[in-house]
Amino acid sequence: MNTLPPAHSAPDSHPAYRVCPLCEATCGLELTISGGAISGVRGDRDDVFSKGFICPKGAAFDRLDNDPDRLRRPMVRGGERWREVGWDEAFAVVTSGLRGVVAAHGRQAIGIYLGNPNVHTLAGGLYAAGLARALGSPNVFSASTVDQMPKHVSCGLMFGDPLAIPVPDLDRTGFLLMLGANPLESNGSLATAPDWPGRLKALKARGGRLVVVDPRNTRTAAMADTHLAIRPGTDSYLLAAIALEIVSSSLMDLGDLADRVSGLDELAGILADFTPDVAAQVCGIPASAITGLARDLAAAPTAAVYGRIGTSATEFGTIASWLVDVLNVLTGNLDRAGGAMFPLAPHQRPGTGSGRGFRLGRWSSRVRGFPEVKGELPAAVMAEEMSTPGEGQIRAMITVAGNPVLSTPDGAALDAALADLEFMVAVDPYLNETTRRAQVILPPPPPSRSAHYDIAFSGLAIHNTARFNPPSLPLEEGDCDEPTILARLTLIALGEPDSPARLVDDQMIADTLGRAVQDPKSPVHQRDPAELRGLLTGSSTTEQRLDMLLRLGAYGDGFGTRPDALCLQALIEAPHGIDLGPLQPRIPEILRTPSGRVELAPAEIRQDLARLRAGIDARRGGLVLIGRRHLRSNNSWMHNLTVLNSGSNTCTLQVHPDTAAEIGLTDGAAARVASRAGEVTVPVEVTDGIQPGVVSLPHGWGHSLAGTRGSVAAARPGVNTNLLTDPMGLDPLSGTSVLNGIPVLVGSARA
Ligand SMILES: Nc1nc2c(c(=O)[nH]1)N[C@H]1C(S)=C(S)[C@@H](COP(=O)(O)OP(=O)(O)OC[C@H]3O[C@@H](n4cnc5c(=O)[nH]c(N)nc54)[C@H](O)[C@@H]3O)O[C@H]1N2
Ligand SMILES: Nc1nc2c(c(=O)[nH]1)N[C@H]1C(S)=C(S)[C@@H](COP(=O)(O)OP(=O)(O)OC[C@H]3O[C@@H](n4cnc5c(=O)[nH]c(N)nc54)[C@H](O)[C@@H]3O)O[C@H]1N2
Ligand code: SF4
Ligand SMILES: [Mo]
């Protein structure tokens, strides 16, 4: 352990190590703490995973932490006026607000939206799902249905567990086929890896090959050996044609999985229509390139296929997500070193190899009848569920770490619907486009004052590690940590507003230990739960809960049965983390399908393929809109720092020179972009970094609404691209919004 202060620091200063919570790469940061504040940030060179890598957002961690616009006290609104109140008063307003709505309209009248940072915080990882359950309402929404839900569905259907998501074995693969991802800007997603640029360079240095499929010539595409500029929304045709070619040319080799797969015989039949010639026409990629790719992929000693936002948030998102893993299976690369593998997080236990499988549609949305997926309904139906009168109408909302007015389809309709609610409470550090509609805002403390452990991302990482950080700075007078905020909301939802917050943890610990001692496979089988409870360490019941999960987990000490193994204290003593080694094969143990096999051709997907077939003859030719990300943005909430919201990080409409000439657009001039859902006016950026016929706008902008508190963001606001996304456009199996491949009309704003 390196305890020496960094050379540049003052004598009274000391380093504090913590994992960056700002994106999925989970880089280790070294903060310099002097005089009770952060005086410096750099990459932690000793971090077992990131080894010093950091990006501009991580480097701005201190400024984000100290942003003067960040809320530090609960706020209660009366009319247009906000006033700061104490925590007890704030929770009392929430209690009476929610109680009134439940009394008048029932529990289903409360909705909840869980935004993206919930997967980055320990509070979100341990309390958000419990809060949603405690509401007892069908109206649970999250950012997943504007993001990765298609992957959950395809993995749920194939492996029986929507959380069993294979990730590319980035450090060992010899061939990476990447679709709809741009990790040089995003730093990766559903494949947690600090330093994608370095890891992709290493792939090439060891003789590996990188193929990128993207309608834009991104920085990632620029690194590729081959860049295929695909027509937006058509990846499923490309992937189906590759799969068909592999099957029909007998190029497949399932390797060790051969006895573990069901549905192989059906593939050739269900994919028969998607020949390379058909795909070529639909995707705009030559048939010879498609068959060549199929052959290269099958012949590569190791290969991984990986798809992200550009495959997921599209018309055929679930089919594309499924085909990605079909290819991994057909080429023998699923679950083997150098292929696509399943991580095993420290708080997880290995599975039993079969289970009840994954079910969709246990309930439906009231207005449009959209099926439930993984306990939630599509974010795109939130507005209509609030604004359509009738029994079951949402009359109150809880938002936790979300800004759906900017992040989900038809933000204007959602904004109006939120304004019309009887009650809304937001757990959020900013007064932004969404939280301005709340009656109460409950701000968590800045990240430096929170403990950190990655519940979500240690299960999605390309290398197994364990890292925990206690708060780098203490809570200040008047702070309430986010676990306590979420626990108190949970108790309010359960009708026990006066119970102490720790009750939520105590109950969870008692339930988990009670089950563990009954489980013959558990390391604590037949021990006394009260004795185990007494052994838990941690400075809060939250930390004790984490200690419990770690000790029961795959690498855990089993409460003393494996003395040198993991527990919370071991992680506290290892501030740079513990390396748990490269990913290991997990089939069959990870499977939870009733058959105990990988289901290659699930019925739900076979059925949805009819839609893909029907799409072959769809008219394509008009302009389509896609998204993009910039290294110095993160969704909607990092535009309030000048270091990030400046320079090339701009909200412009990217247009190819030929397209610009056709429409009469010039660089820097204003364009009007209209879709079925709405329209925006935005400056044009003419660039050959995008294909003709495709235009691109980044999301998360549009900070010009009144009544928010973000002075830097408001000065350089951009426009909200989600005024153009159509709430009617959903991938039917996952309820995920079509955010890429939206038909638009573009004209000069002067015309
Ligand atoms: N800097 C930064 N980092 C982020 C975020 C951020 O906002 N900014 N957000 C974080 C979040 S929440 C997520 S989910 C991840 C997302 O991580 P990524 O998926 O890597 O995100 P993007 O950079 O948007 O890359 C998507 C790519 O898909 C391309 N694309 C669009 N349509 C299609 C299509 O139809 N087919 C194909 N093949 N490609 C298409 C786009 O041109 C774009 O280059 O990033 C995370 N990291
Ligand atoms: N058109 C288009 N739309 C998109 C996308 C796209 O590619 N194109 N991408 C989609 C994707 S992948 C995602 S994930 C969504 C994101 O959708 P959201 O999660 O709704 O949006 P964010 O901008 O991430 O909002 C995060 C909120 O959390 C708050 N916050 C930050 N840190 C914390 C914390 O520690 N605790 C709490 N309680 N709050 C915190 C911020 O202030 C902000 O209000 O956007 C989606 N929207
Ligand atoms: S890449 Fe992501 S995790 Fe790493 S420093 Fe940047 S924002 Fe933080
Ligand atoms: Mo996301």
Image (cartoon, grey):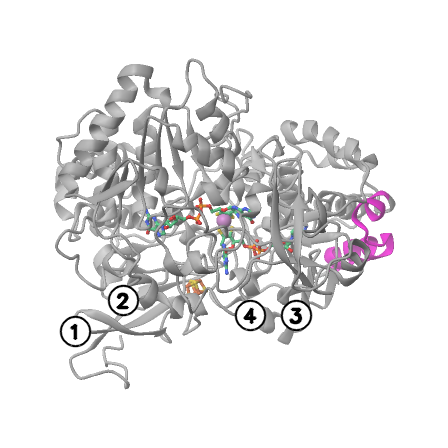
Which region shows up in magenta? 278-299
From the viewer's perspective, is residue 52 above or below residue 406?
below
Classify mark 3: helix, strand or loop: helix
| Figure quadrant of residue 98 | top left
Q: Give whichever of 477, 503 is nearer the camera.
A: 477
The answer to whether residue 60 is visible is yes
Amino acid residing under circle 1 = Gly
Please give the name of the residue rendered at 50% of the width and 50% of the height, measured from the top-left corner: 702
Q: Are marks 4 and 3 in contact (CB under 8 Å)?
A: yes
The residue that mark 3 highlights is 223
- Of mark 1 and mark 4, the one earlier in the sequence is 1
Q: Give whichever of 103, 29 is nearer the camera.
A: 103
Amino acid residing under circle 3 = Met
Quarter the N terminus occupies: bottom left
Q: Do the residues labelled 3 and 1 touch (CB within 8 Å)?
A: no
Asked if disc 3 is less than 8 Å from ligand 1, the answer is no
Q: How crowded is mark 1: few (under 14 residues within 10 Å), some or many (20 or more)?
A: few
Name the spot of residue 260 as percent of width and height, x first.
60, 40
Name the spot of residue 607 as percent of width and height, x first.
69, 27
Classify mark 2: helix, strand or loop: loop
Name the spot of residue 517 as percent of width and height, x first.
24, 35
Q: Is 290 in the magenta?
A: yes
Q: Do the residues labelled 3 and 2 touch (CB within 8 Å)?
A: no
Marks 4/3: CA–CA distance: 9 Å
Q: Residues within 10 Å of mark 4 (few under 14, many from 20)?
A: some
From the viewer's perspective, is residue 461 above or below residue 727?
below
- Of mark 3 and mark 2, the one earlier in the sequence is 3
The residue that mark 2 highlights is 574
Amino acid residing under circle 2 = Ala
The residue that mark 4 highlights is 197
The residue that mark 1 highlights is 35
